Each structure stands twice: as structure tokens, then as C-alpha cells.
Image: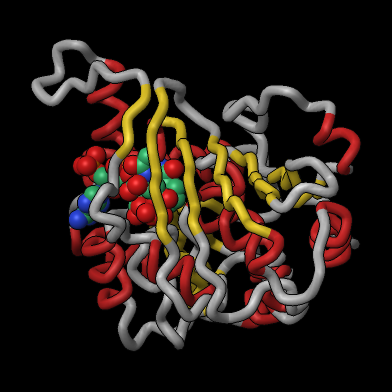
Amino acid sequence: MKPKIFIDGEHGTTGLQIRTRLAGRTDLEVISIPEEERRNKDMRADYLRAADIAILCLPDDASREAVSLLHGHNDTRIIDTSTAHRIHADWAYGFAELEKAQRERIKSARLVANPGCYPTGAIALVRPLRDAGLLGSDHAISVNAVSGYTGGGKQMIAQMEDPNNPEHISANNFLYGTSLRHKHVPELQMHGRLEKRPVFSPSVGRFAQGMIVQVPLFLDQMQGKHSLKSIHEALTAHYAGQDIVRVVPLEESANAGRIDAEELAGTDGMKLYVFGTEGDGEVNLVAVLDNLGKGASGAAVQNMDLMLS
Ligand SMILES: NC(=O)C1=CN([C@@H]2O[C@H](COP(=O)(O)OP(=O)(O)OC[C@H]3O[C@@H](n4cnc5c(N)ncnc54)[C@H](OP(=O)(O)O)[C@@H]3O)[C@@H](O)[C@H]2O)C=CC1
Ligand SMILES: CC(=O)N[C@@H](CCC(=O)OP(=O)(O)O)C(=O)O
């Protein structure tokens, strides 16, 4: 029998993208709730319980509700794309490239929390350097990022695209999360293995999909003596043998000139760059991804495939 997949929140931004990715699949059966019933709790409960894997593409509260609807129904495995369970001890963190054991953890887990889009980029840059001992646990990290506006879901898409929306946003590029208490910070801190809360400053640009996440570092604050080359080597070693995260060769980075936030829009991969000038004291680590690709829907499908393997 083919595994049954239910996407709770199928008609939202992340859900639709997962639906599209699964459209041509003959190895599984997507069970779909009619759009007009998407908030019908009893019907959702039936679909959730009928599924082998439920992918939750809902706001945090609705995700918690979906999990409670599955209480006692342990045959359904869950992938939650919301922020609700990303630092919960019972949930496997759905970033397969996090460390060697992560793929196996996801494969065997019943509960998988898909990472946030910004943390996907930042953790991809920081965690290998923490694990390889280049960064101490008390290292102070700053993360500056820009996302396409689909990162804000249906509501922000309408605000950015519809001039008649009562909450229309006219800015082409705006900073937010200025209290430095964005909901992604705890996840970044925990899975980045950082003692100090990172400074995280997100922003949004007038483009639909894509993202740049930057982590600048001072070499004299790192553990040991480091260079662009040794940092690049540590990242390259960490991501060897997989094909989703690409560490861009130093020479290619040096010649890159401009980095386009939309570079990987519409794809499920991620590129990591090490920028700077060899011999100087600073580097800028940069991740480029699609907020809806490796940052959300692409990662959810990757996790689903691992769970089905
Ligand atoms: N967009 C992105 O780039 C990313 C999003 N995520 C996360 O994915 C999740 C979904 O986000 P996104 O797709 O952007 O959001 P959207 O607002 O685009 O979609 C959410 C969907 O959930 C439905 N919904 C809301 N409340 C309930 C409820 N109580 N019961 C059933 N359905 C409900 C909405 O229905 P209705 O149309 O009626 O409102 C809508 O279809 C969020 O937790 C978000 O943080 C994670 C990474 C990246
Ligand atoms: C541009 C924008 O608004 N982005 C969202 C994050 C999108 C995302 O990653 O969703 P999760 O919070 O579920 O991880 C935000 O900052 O709240």
C-alpha cells in the first residue's frame, strides 16, 4: 500500500508548494481536504488520523492543535513546518545536514520539526564551525538576513502585492524584528550550539522567493588561528558527500561580485559562500537559499523522503 500523506494547511503558501512538489509522485497517495473545509476541525482530525505522514503547514497554535488531535494516534508520523516544536526534546530537528547522525534521527523519528528558513541558513554556516572547534560555545554571533516576502505567508503576500489591502506595505525593503526577539532566535541558539543569544536582524525585500543570510566573523575572536581557507575547508569537509548544500569554491566567491537573493528561488538547494580577503582579519559567511525551498517546503519533502526510506 502506498503511504498516505496529508498536508494540513495545504492551501497556504508552504502547503501549496509541498503539494506541487508531490504532484507527480506515484509512490505515495496525497489525501486532500477540500479547501472550504480547511478549518473544519473534525474533518482535519479524520485526515490527520488516516495519514501515515501528516505535514503541518499551519500557524504555531494550529500546529499544536493538530498534534493534540493526534494524541493517542501514534501511527501517524508528523512533520511540523511551524516554529512550535523546533526546540522540543521529543522532536527531531529536520535539518538533515546538521551533523552525521541527523539523517538517521529523521529517518526513524515519529515527530520531525522542520527548521525555520532563516535558521536553515545561519545554522548551516555556524554549526559546522562550532562542531569542528573553530568557534567556541561562548562566541557572540550576529545574523543579518533578507527574505522574499512569501516568507510572511498569505497575509504578507497580500500586503506586498495588493495596493488596496488596508495594511498595504509600500516599502521595497524593510527591517523588522528590531526588538531582537524574533521567534527564530531560540532555535538558532539551540541548534547552533551557542551559549549567547545571537543578534538576529531580519528584513524583507520586494521579491517573492529567495533569501540571503549573513554571519560576519572576526578571525581573532575564533578558537585557534584561522583564515578564509581554513574556514572554507571546515565547511567543505562538513558538507562532503551530499548534494543539497553546496560550499562555493573560494575563487568563485572572490569573483562573484554581487550576490542575488533570488539566485536559488524555485530550487531546494542552498549555497554557502566564504567572503573576505585572505590575510585580512574578517570573513563574511553567506547562505543563499529559497525561503520556500530548503527554507520550508523543499526541506519538508526531503524529510518526508527520509522518513519513508
Ligand atoms: N512561508 C515561508 O517561507 C515559511 C513558512 N514556514 C511556516 O509554515 C507555516 C505555514 O506558513 P505559510 O504557509 O507561510 O502560511 P499561510 O498563511 O500562507 O498558510 C497557512 C495556512 O494554514 C491555514 N490555517 C490557519 N489557521 C488554521 C487552523 N486553525 N486550522 C486549519 N488551517 C488553518 C490557513 O488557512 P486560511 O487561508 O483560512 O487562513 C492557510 O491555508 C507557518 O508556521 C510558518 O511559520 C516555515 C518556513 C518558511
Ligand atoms: C519574511 C517573514 O515574515 N518571515 C517569517 C519567517 C518565515 C519562516 O521561516 O517561518 P517559520 O517562522 O515557521 O520558520 C517571519 O519572520 O516570521
Report if residue 225 is visible in the image.
Answer: yes
In this rendering, the count of numbered labels is 0
Q: Residue furthest top?
A: 163
- Residue 248 is left or right of residue 85, and the answer is right
Classify residue 111 as left or right of residue 70.
right
- The residue closer to the viewer here, 247 or 106, is 247
Task: Classify 25 as above or below 43.
Answer: above
The reply to whether residue 34 is visible in this rendering is no
Residue 171 to residue 20: above or below? above
Residue name at image x 62 percent, y 31 percent: 266
Side (left or right) of 10 relative to 28: left
In the figure, residue 223 lies in which quadrant? bottom right
Q: Residue at x 25, y 24 (%)?
A: 158
Of 140 and 123, nearer the camera is: 140
Is residue 166 shown left or right of residue 100? left
Instruction: Look at the image and tell me in which quarter the C terminus lies.
Output: bottom right
- In x, y percent, where is residue 289? 62, 41
User: Residue 197: x, y in percent?
Assistant: 41, 71
Q: Quadrant of the N terminus?
A: bottom right
The residue positioned 22% from the left and 46% from the top of the image is 37
The residue positioned farthest toward the left in the image shown:
166
How was this image coloured? Answer: secondary structure
- 104 and 120: which is toward the camera: 120
Query: Looking at the picture, how far across and down is residue 246, in whole percent?
Result: 80, 47
Return the residue nearer the eye: 169 or 7: 169
Residue 132, above or below 288: below
